[in-house]
C-alpha cells in the first residue's frame, strides 16, 4: 500500500509544480499583497482537487471517455473563462479589479480559484487515468480513501506554500517594481492556457468530423 501511495504522490507532485493557471492566480494575488485572498483562492483550487479526485474514484473519467462531447463542452467553457480572466489582468496593469484589495472579497477569490480549476476537465482525466493505473483493480475502501486524501493534502501543501512564499516582503517589493509587467505577463500566460485549451478541443472536433 505504501509503495502505491508513494507512486501516486510522485506523479501528482510532478503535475502540481508545473506552472499553470492555478499557479499564476495564487502567485499574482499573494505577490500583490493579498495573502488572505491568495489563501482563499488556494482553498477554492484544492476544493476542486478533492472533488475531481472523488469523482475519479467514482468513475468520472469513464463518463468523459464515453461522452466526449461533455468533456469538450467543459473544456471550451474553461478556455473561455481563462480568456476572461486574462482580459481582466491585462486591463489592470497590475492593479486590476481582480487583484485590488478594496474590490475583491475572500468569497470572490475562492470563486476564482474554484472556477479556474473546475473548468479544466483534464484534472479529472489525470486523476482518472492515474488512479486507474496506479491503484489495484479493486482497491479496498482504505486504499481509496488514502489516495483521495493524499492528493488533497498535496494540493493544500503546495498552494498554501505558494500563497505564503509569494506574499514574502522581498517578493512583494520586486512585484511592486514590476507590477505592470508582471500583470501583463500573467495575463498573457493565462490567455495562452485558455487559448490552448480551446484550440486542442477544436482540433479534436475537427479530427472527428473529417
Image: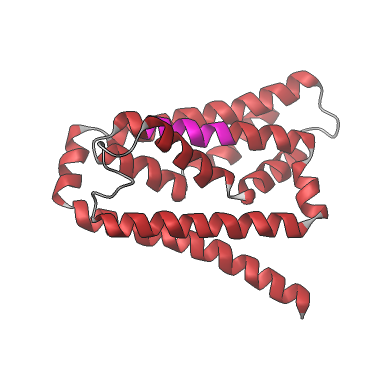
Relative height, residue 183 to residue 60 (above, below): below
Percent of width and height locating residue 136: 81, 32
User: Quick check: is 65 in the magenta stretch?
Assistant: no
Viewer-side residue, 30 vs 153: 30
Percent of width and height locating residue 181: 22, 58
Side of 72 relative to 103 (left or right): right
Image quadrant where one finds the C terminus: bottom right
Percent of width and height locating residue 34: 28, 34
Q: Look at 42% across and 44% down and name the residue there.
A: 23
Q: Look at 61% across and 45% down and name the residue there.
A: 123
Helix, strand or loop for the magenta stretch, by majority? helix
Image quadrant where one finds the N terminus: top right
Relative height, residue 102 to residue 25 (above, below): above
Q: Which residues are magenta?
A: 38-48
Side of 83 relative to 37 (left or right): right
Percent of width and height locating residue 17: 46, 43
Residue lying furthest bottom: 210
Quarter of the image where one finds residue 4: top right
Relative height, residue 55 to residue 200 (above, below): above
Residue lying furthest front: 103
Q: Is any atom of residue 109 visible in this view?
A: yes
Viewer-side residue, 56 vs 33: 33
Quarter of the image where one finds residue 108: top left
Q: Is any atom of residue 164 visible in this view?
A: no
Q: Look at 64% across and 70% down and name the residue there.
A: 202
Side of 61 relative to 107 (left or right): right
Amino acid at each position: 500500500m505504501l509503495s502505491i501511495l508513494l507512486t501516486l504522490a510522485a506523479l501528482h507532485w510532478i503535475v502540481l509544480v508545473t506552472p499553470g493557471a492555478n499557479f499564476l492566480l495564487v502567485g499574482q494575488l499573494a505577490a500583490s499583497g493579498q495573502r488572505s485572498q491568495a489563501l482563499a483562492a488556494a482553498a477554492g483550487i484544492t476544493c476542486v482537487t478533492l472533488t475531481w479526485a472523488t469523482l475519479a474514484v467514482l468513475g468520472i473519467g469513464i463518463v468523459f471517455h464515453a461522452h466526449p462531447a461533455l468533456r469538450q463542452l467543459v473544456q471550451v467553457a474553461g478556455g473561455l473563462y481563462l480568456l476572461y480572466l486574462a482580459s481582466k489582468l491585462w486591463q489592470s496593469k497590475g492593479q486590476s479589479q481582480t487583484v485590488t484589495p478594496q474590490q475583491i472579497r475572500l468569497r470572490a477569490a475562492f470563486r476564482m480559484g474554484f472556477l479556474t480549476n473546475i473548468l479544466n476537465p483534464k484534472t479529472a482525466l489525470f486523476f482518472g487515468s492515474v488512479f486507474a493505473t496506479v491503484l489495484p483493480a479493486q482497491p479496498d475502501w482504505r486504499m481509496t480513501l488514502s489516495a483521495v486524501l493524499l492528493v488533497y493534502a498535496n494540493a493544500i501543501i503546495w498552494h498554501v506554500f505558494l500563497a505564503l512564499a509569494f506574499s514574502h516582503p522581498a517578493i512583494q517589493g520586486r512585484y511592486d517594481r514590476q507590477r505592470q509587467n508582471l500583470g501583463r505577463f500573467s495575463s498573457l500566460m493565462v490567455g495562452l492556457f485558455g487559448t490552448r485549451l480551446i484550440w486542442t478541443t477544436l482540433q479534436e472536433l475537427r479530427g472527428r468530423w473529417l
